[in-house]
């Protein structure tokens, strides 16, 4: 018989902690190796955490809502299944009190004392959203290990602050402010009367943003603040691609792959990135440009919830069209089923958004930081176009599509950004209709 700790796994290079969303098992349950035990949220994705060892779950070391550092234990598993009878039948599904992240008890913190001064990114994000200053944050009592301020501590404080009287909001005011005279009730009433009246018709619904939507909103705002966006547009004749896809999509289907236009677009993007390495880059500070050797193309995927997620096809330039189609299908299915891992979202060097899926012709996409460019492909539409054949021009019906290329004007000028999107269009227009699979 052996007791082993189940640790919070590393879920990406930049991920240092995870928030417990849900326990999928309860104390006393038998667990197979690689079977999911709990759901964890990071700042990138929600994911299930599987057990490394088979056995019986004998102890949970964190409760729903706790933030756990990577490498810290979240549960204990007894690897000898023969002692299952020793586990109490009425064991609780999860700790009801603030359970410590490790076996040792948390340090005692005085009720009026401050927290440990260490704040997780999740806590800092909540504080930023609720406009809580660092001085105010430091005065909140933490219930975590060694007085650490947890998410639940901060949310409880926010709720209490909403219901507290106006005169009690300055919890950590300096001595000079405390000694200042209190405003007379008549003056307060006069001040209140100066505020504009608010009237609601009742013909609306307030929808609270979910965690992912809040992250998307913040990242979009950050990207527009960081990068001066410029967008160039090109129209491409993709008739050959449409005809080739119509010819081969049944064969792909027999192999279990739904052949969309996205892998063909990614193939063209990967070729163009090899020719224009400055687009496959990021900016470091104010004076350095990092040129990426790997070509990792992210593909924007819409989730059933309406949110957007961007899994990354690593080394896209090393894959043939069949390999790209398999990757696109795999990511699309796992995104809809909420089964993407953090590593699936890391390392992107360029992003493609196929807005034509929604019938859109043009768009001005926002760059995924720290990348410096993003391409959107519009809907493919039949149009009359001029065709040159044998030295003569004629009007024909062609399959046409707009490409919209947004780029960071700090390091990508209009000439480079325009030439890149033109090169992508060239690769699409010169698609070999005789190629096989």
Image (cartoon, grey):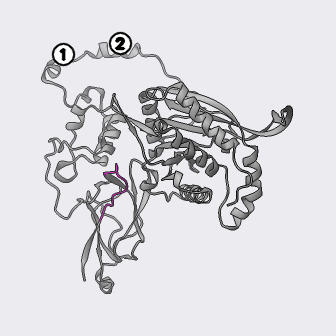
User: Are circles 2 and 1 on residues that touch, CB within 8 Å?
Assistant: no
**Rendered image: mark on residue 396:** none
Secondary structure at badge 1 equals loop
Give the quadrant of residue 285.
Answer: top left
Q: Is residue 230 placed above or below 432 in the rendered structure?
A: above
Q: Return the x and y of residue 368 as percentages of the image width and height.
A: 47, 39
8 falls in the magenta region: yes
In this picture, residue 3 sits left or right of residue 388:
left
Q: Return the x and y of residue 206 as percentages of the image width and height.
A: 53, 37
Quarter in which the N terminus is drawn: bottom left
In this picture, residue 397 sits left or right of residue 39:
right
User: Which stretch appears magenta?
Assistant: 7-16
Q: Nearer the viewer, residue 152 or 283?
A: 283
Q: Nearer the viewer, residue 273 or 13?
A: 273
Label 2: which residue?
190
**Rendered image: mark on residue 181:** 1
Secondary structure at badge 2 equals helix
Q: Nearer the viewer, residue 284 or 65?
A: 284
Q: Return the x and y of residue 184 as percentages of the image width and height.
A: 25, 15
Q: Return the x and y of residue 109 as percentages of the image width and height.
A: 14, 48
Q: Is residue 369 visible?
A: no
């Amino acid at each position: 018989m052996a007791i082993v700790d189940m640790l919070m796994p590393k879920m990406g290079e930049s991920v240092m902690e995870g928030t417990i969303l849900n326990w999928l098992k309860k104390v006393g349950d038998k667990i197979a190796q690689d079977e999911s035990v709990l759901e964890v949220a990071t700042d990138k994705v929600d994911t299930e955490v599987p057990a490394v060892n088979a056995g019986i779950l004998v102890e949970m070391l964190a409760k729903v809502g706790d933030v756990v550092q990577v490498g810290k234990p979240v549960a204990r598993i007894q690897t000898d299944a023969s002692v299952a009878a020793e586990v109490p039948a009425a064991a609780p599904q999860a700790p009801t009190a603030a359970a410590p992240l490790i076996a040792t008890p948390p340090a005692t913190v005085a009720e009026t004392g401050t927290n440990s001064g260490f704040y997780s990114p999740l806590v800092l994000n909540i504080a930023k959203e609720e406009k809580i200053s660092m001085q105010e944050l430091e005065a909140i009592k933490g219930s975590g290990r060694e007085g650490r301020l947890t998410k639940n501590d901060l949310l409880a404080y926010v709720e209490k602050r909403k219901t507290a009287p106006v005169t009690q909001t300055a919890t950590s005011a300096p001595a000079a402010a405390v000694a200042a005279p209190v405003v007379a009730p008549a003056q307060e009433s006069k001040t209140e009367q100066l505020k504009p009246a608010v009237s609601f018709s009742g013909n609306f619904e307030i929808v609270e943003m979910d965690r992912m939507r809040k992250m998307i909103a913040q990242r979009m705002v950050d990207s527009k603040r960081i990068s001066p966006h410029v967008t160039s547009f090109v129209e491409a004749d993709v008739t050959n691609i449409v005809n080739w896809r119509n010819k081969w999509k049944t064969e792909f289907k027999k192999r279990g792959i739904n052949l969309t236009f996205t892998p063909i677009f990614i193939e063209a993007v990967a070729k163009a990135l090899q020719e224009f390495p400055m687009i496959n880059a990021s900016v470091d500070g104010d004076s350095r440009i990092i040129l990426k050797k790997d070509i990792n193309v992210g593909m924007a995927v819409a989730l059933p919830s309406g949110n957007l997620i961007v899994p990354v096809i690593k080394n896209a330039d090393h894959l043939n069209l069949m390999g790209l189609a398999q990757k696109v299908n795999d990511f699309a299915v796992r995104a809809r089923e909420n089964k993407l891992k953090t590593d699936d979202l890391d390392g992107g060097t360029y992003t493609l958004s196929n807005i034509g899926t929604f019938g859109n012709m043009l768009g001005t996409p926002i760059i995924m930081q720290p990348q410096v460019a993003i391409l959107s492909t519009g809907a493919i539409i039949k149009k009359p176009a001029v065709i040159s054949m044998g030295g003569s021009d004629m009007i024909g019906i062609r399959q046409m599509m707009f490409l919209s290329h947004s780029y960071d004007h700090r390091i990508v000028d209009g000439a480079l950004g325009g030439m890149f999107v033109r090169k992508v269009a060239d690769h699409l227009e010169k698609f070999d209709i005789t190629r096989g699979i």
